[in-house]
Each structure stands twice: as structure tokens, then as C-alpha cells.
Amino acid sequence: MQKRLSKASFNTIRRTLLTGVARSGRKYQVWLLLGCLLLGLSACTPTPQGNVIGYVIAKQLGRFDTPPSTARGSVQGMVLHEGKPLAGATVVLAERNGRPHTAQSDAQGRYRMDSVPRGQYALAAIAPYFTETRLQDKLGLPLLVTIAPGAIAEAPPLVLQRHHAVPLPAPLVAATQFTLTATSVVTAAFPMSSTAQVQAFQFVNAGVVISTLRLYLPISNALEPDLPTLFLVYPNLVDAWQSVSVAFAAEGFAVVAISPSAARALNIDAHARDARIALALTQQGALDPRLRDRPAVALGGSFSSAILHRLLRDLDQEVAAWVTVGGIANAFDGTADFYAGQIDIPPEYTYLIPALGPPNLYPLAFLRYSPVYTAAQLPPTLIIHTDADRVISISQAYALEAALHAAGVPVSVFYYQDVSHYLQIDDQMTDAGREMFYRVVDFAQQYRK
């Protein structure tokens, strides 16, 4: 009688195979190939569940307690586009604990990284306006480069392609089954006795009902015909942030707010596409005719700042500026902080970082959460962060600020000392929270069009 392989057993076997590749060299790719043929080729794509199982096993085996090898080597290679050298691309190689090593391609497309711990790695490359890529074989499995002590490894060329956003369906309102589901009037304590009209909408994208789209409008007898638009992507349930949305609406903004769908899990590109559809519906006048064709100022924080980064990669002039509050700038550094025990992840998110997979084998997942490598593509930016943040270190903000300055992108910052990780408008609102709010208002007014 044939015994069905459980999902957990399958992912454990797959992770063991990949660990064998990382530890023991090219010959283990034969075993990896055989394992994939036995388990089904499509199943060899890493899953969050399998990544977490691999992390738990590696932790039990003490893999994260082993200090990096003191034996070091180098790697060099080329970055190409359409067969020609590409300058200014960032090549990334990450250790198992997430610590990144990077190099920039020169005018001849060449790069070199030195002082890399011995081992095997999947190299990746990214550049503004180009889609991130990694070295992989014909089956889509990581093509590993071996770093040997005192030696210079020659890596195969990394080939980058221009990034093109996937077209949205048309007509968008009909294609997404866009619907108004509720209308009400809501209030907030800050600013004093704030009131706004809120409309709830839903749409369908890739078979998932997105019911977290909201429009908050100021209560007024003489609404402006060209309301400035704030596009807020919250890190969790949109209605939990109602007081924030109402406060901004009371300042004269049309506030379009959305939050991630749990059905998307860690699929950052799917979250970004949901947000892109919401913004496109807004700018087509589906939510309110006064918002048609008006660029927005976007705001996100924590996890949702990464969603906004992916969204901005797909846009042209639809967003005039953006605000990141307690946001992620470099997921590799954040991962290294996690494995070093330097940040405090809330219990419900304990396995969020491990679910992305081993960064030495699957660097693309981390690049997608790392706007620091595509800063030149970002619009004018306001960075807000507290040095008391134990979830996402303020060093992330410093890194993004430096990258924006280097790219010549206008950047403003508000660094403060407070326990708040994100916007808080409630009875415990602090002086720093008030200043944060009005800095966002001033910034948004500056870039309203």
C-alpha cells in the first residue's frame, strides 16, 4: 500500500536536500535533482512553511550558533543587460544569518567582492528600473558559487532585465468587481473632535476579495474640487487605524486607506498589486470623481513600507512623494539583527523572517523588501523612525537616508525618542506623536498637486 507523504515531511526532506547543497558542494545537486524528481518538480519551489521547518531544524542542530568562518575568499563576475555590460547594479551575496556582502558593477559591468566567508552562495543582482535576479540553473534551483580561502571565484554572468509592471485588467471597475459596501460618519479625539465620512469598498484580485479599501473625506459644506490625496497602506487591519485616517481627513485630505489581505501571506508582490489596483481605482475616479488623475502622497510603515516600495517600482508619476514610518530598508540587515537577537519580534511574528528562507540560497525574497538598493527610483521621501524601536532598528532608517542622498533623491527625516513603533493617535498620544502627525501633514501639503 502506498503511503501519502505529508506536507511537513515533504518540506523537511526538501530542506534537508537544500542544506546538503549548501554544505557539501556541487555533487549534492545530483541528490537534489533526484529528490525533486521523486517529490515533484513543482514542489521544489520553497514555501514559507518549508522554510520555517528548515529554520527550526537548523536551529536545533545549532547552525546559527556557529561563528562565521575566519577563512575568507573573493568572488568576481559581470552584470549584463541584453548582452552588454551594465554599470551601477548592486550584486548581493548573503551569509546564512542574513549578513550581506555587496559590490557595484563598474562601467565594464564588472564587480568584485572580497573578504567573503568560505562557503557556497547564490548571488543576486538588482538595479533601479531593473527586475532583481539571481544565479540559477535550468530547473530554477539556486546555482551556487563556491568561495574558497584565499581564492577568487569567477561567477557566471548575472543578467538583468528592465522592470515592467504587469498591466492591470481593463475596464478596471468591472474586471475587479469594485463595489461600495458601506457609508458612515466617524469621529476621532485628535485633532479636537475630528469628524469624517468613511466609505468602505471591496474588489476582487486574482480570486481574493479585498474588503479593506476605505475612503475618508472631510465633513464640509464646501469641499474642495481638487482634494489632495493621501494613500495610506497600513500594516494590519485598516479599521484599527481609523483614528489616524479621520485625523488626516480632518486636515483637508481625501484619505484612501487599505491594509494587507491575510490570504496573501508573505507574497509582497501580490500585496503591492492589491495596493496598485486600489490606487488606480482612486485615480480613475471610481471612489470619488474629484480624485481622478491626481497624484497621491503615500504613507506606509513597518511591513507596509515594503509593500509601498514594491508598489513604487511599478509606478511612474502616480505618487508624488512618500512617507515611511518605522519602515524596512534592508531586509538582509534586519535578518542579521534577528538572528543576532538584537530586535524584539512580537510573538505572533516569530517565524516571519525564517519564512522567507535562507538568504544565502534565496536572496530575491530579501531584495524585494529592500528599497535601499533601488533608492534612485523612489520619489521625494520623508523618513520617520524612533531610536527606541526594538522591532525594526533605526539603523534601517539611516541606511535608507544615506542611499537617498547618494541617489540625489530629496529626503526629509524625523528621528525621535519614543516607545511608538508607528503612528499612534489615541488617549496615550505623546508629544512626539503629535509632531510626527503634523510633519506628515506639512510634507503632504508640500507635494500636493
Image (tube, helix red, strand yellow):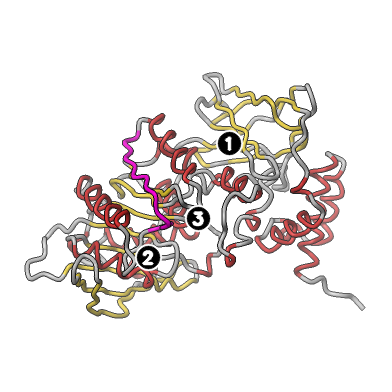
Residue 90: which quarter of the image?
A: top right
Q: Earlier in the sequence, mark 1 or mark 2?
A: 1
Residue, disc 1: 125
First reached walking from the N terminus: tag 3 or tag 1: 1
Task: Look at the picture and state if 40 lies above or below 79.
Answer: below
Residue 279, placed above or below residue 149: below
Element marked by disc 3: helix
Residue at the spot 83% in from the left edge and 74% down from the top edge: 4
To which residue does mark 2 refer? 258
Which of labels 1 and 2 is toward the front? Answer: 2
Is 56 left or right of 270, judged from the image as shown?
right
In whole angstroms, how far apart are the C-alphas of marks 3 and 1? 18 Å
Residue 163 percent location from the top left of the image: 47, 42
Left or right: residue 171 compared with residue 267: left
* Residue at 58% from the left image edge and 36% from the top image edge: 125
Q: Nearer the viewer, residue 275 or 348?
A: 348
